[in-house]
Amino acid sequence: MSTLTISPENQNRLAIAVPIVAMLLSLFVVYPTWMRYNDLVAVVATQRKSLDDLRATPLPDVGAVPPADAGLPSEPPKFLGQLRVVAQMARCRVIGFDLGASGKQDSGPVRAVRARVDLEGRYTEIRDFLFRLAGAPRLYVVTDCAVSVPANAAQSAVSALLNRPPGTLHATIEIERYVTPPGT
């Protein structure tokens, strides 16, 4: 059996090369990885503190606005009446109302029902309508809002005949409201 013999010259080279390779390995591999690890530990600590703060935050008060109304036959006229009051307060004019607007019809304890309302008014009045709708006595969600210039608004004689002041816009707003089955 032969034993591995290394010449003294090679032993000296290995004695110098092995510590240098170990030092280079620690400088270019281990040290950067260790620094990245320390950075990640600091990030985790910050995120953990943020998560603890979020968990300690109390839930917001739901408020006095009822989210849903009973799905009685009187609900759609009541809804239209509330929209007319909000529009009147915002100085808008309701020119169309479509209760059968396309949208999701969920089944379950609470159903989402969509309606489309066509309004006329100036930009600030339409914006005021949306603002006042958010403060309505019931929860309404605006799912779509399209504002355009009425088709015959360019003709000033037609606008005068229709009692439209200059700058009148047409808005089509889709509103989602929530109803519960009667008796719940």
Image: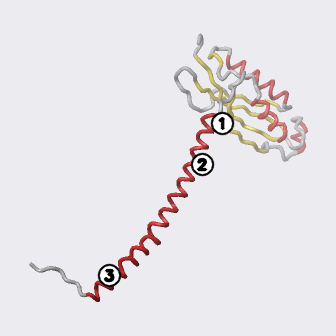
| Quadrant the N terminus occupies | bottom left
Place of residue 18 in the rendered image (x, y in percent of width and height, measured from the top left): 35, 77
Instruction: Give the numbered dot on residue 46.
Output: 2
Q: Residues within 10 Å of mark 1 (few under 14, many from 20)?
A: few
**Amino acid type, residue under disc 2 in the picture:** Thr
Place of residue 176 in the rendered image (x, y in percent of width and height, measured from the top left): 65, 30
Q: Residues within 10 Å of mark 2 (few under 14, many from 20)?
A: few
Measure how far apart labels 3 and 1 are at the Cα level: 75 Å
* Left or right side of 113 for 83: right
**Amino acid type, residue under disc 3 in the picture:** Leu
Measure how far apart labels 2 and 1 are at the Cα level: 37 Å
Residue 26, placed above or below residue 115: below
Mark 2 or mark 1, which has the lower sequence index?
Answer: 2
Element carrying mark 3: helix
Element carrying mark 1: strand
Place of residue 168 in the rendered image (x, y in percent of width and height, measured from the top left): 84, 41
Residue at the spot x=78%, y=31% of the render?
Answer: 95
Q: Determine which residue is flagged by label 1.
A: 143
Q: Determine which residue is flagged by label 3.
A: 14
Element carrying mark 2: helix
Q: Residues within 10 Å of mark 3 (few under 14, many from 20)?
A: few
| Quadrant the C terminus occupies | top right
Give the number of the mark in front: 3 or 2: 3
Q: Looking at this view, is 44 or 101 the one in front?
A: 44
* Left or right side of 132 for 73: left
Mark 3 or mark 2, which has the lower sequence index?
Answer: 3
Q: Residue furthest bottom?
A: 9
